[in-house]
Amino acid sequence: MRLSNCVPLLFLTFVLGAGFNFASAGEAPLEVVPSVDLNRYAGKWYEIARLPNRFQRDCAGNVTATYTLRPDGKIQVLNQCASTDGKNKSARGTARLVGGKEPNTKLKVSFFWPFSGDYWIIELDPEYRWAVVGEPRRRYLWILSREPQMAVETYQDLLKRAAEKGFDVNRLIRTQQTP
């Protein structure tokens, strides 16, 4: 990966890994799902929407995240997107569980050691068809799906749930997914 591609990733890992794991003043602690089966969670996810963030500013669409379980208990992360200049962009990282092996709901993701960011699974479909990922300060949020498109009713329900958890869903950017 070229150095120019690393700068946004450095920013992401620095900002998310700044060591602050608390909500803003007056907000309740961010709740996560009860548990996650990492074998079912692994695989490819399509980004449906996200809160604006600096490290994805060059992503024009077709954003995906692929998670692969490693023998050492960590998770390989591959983020990809079509960039604004028409090229494909990718970033590889590693996720590790926070607080032991169970319930697998809170992870730390690092794209550039030693910095890491919070990756908390805050909503998850029982059939693992969609997920919502955030971080405790509520600055970052992603709505993910196993399919490139999501039913409007499901999306609206997830917006409502995220808003109830204190996220500013009015700022969400819908991700363009094209074949």
Image (spheres, rainbow, N blue to C red):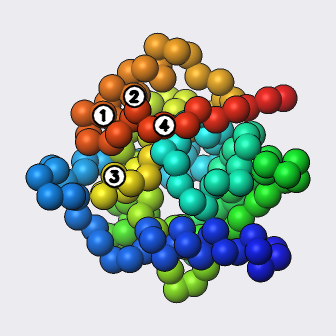
Gap between marks 2 and 3 measured at Cα: 14 Å
- Say whether residue 84 is left or right of residue 52: right
Earlier-in-chain disc, 4 versus 1 = 1
Residue marked by disc 3: 138
Q: Which of 63 and 95 is in front in this view?
A: 63
| Label 4: element kind | loop
The CA span between labels 4 and 3 is 12 Å
Q: Is residue 124 above or below residue 137?
A: above
Residue identifier under label 1: 163
Q: What is the quadrant of residue 94 in the picture? A: bottom right
3D distance between C-alphas at marks 4 and 1: 11 Å
Helix, strand or loop under label 1? helix
Question: Which residue corresponds to mark 4?
Answer: 172
Disc nearer the start of the sequence (4/3): 3
Q: In which quarter of the image is residue 173?
A: top right
**Residue position marked by numbered label 2 in the rendering:** 159
Q: Earlier in the sequence, mark 3 or mark 1?
A: 3
Residue type at the position of mark 4: Leu
> Which corner quadrant holds the C terminus?
top right
Is residue 20 found left or right of 146 in the rendered image?
left
Distance from disc 1 to disc 2, alpha carbons, whole Å, reads 6 Å
Question: What amino acid type is highlighted by mark number 1?
Answer: Ala
Q: Pointer 3: residues within 10 angstroms few (<14), some, or many (20+)?
A: some
**Element type at marker 2?**
helix
Question: Do the residues under discs 3 and 1 have CB atoms within 8 angstroms?
Answer: no
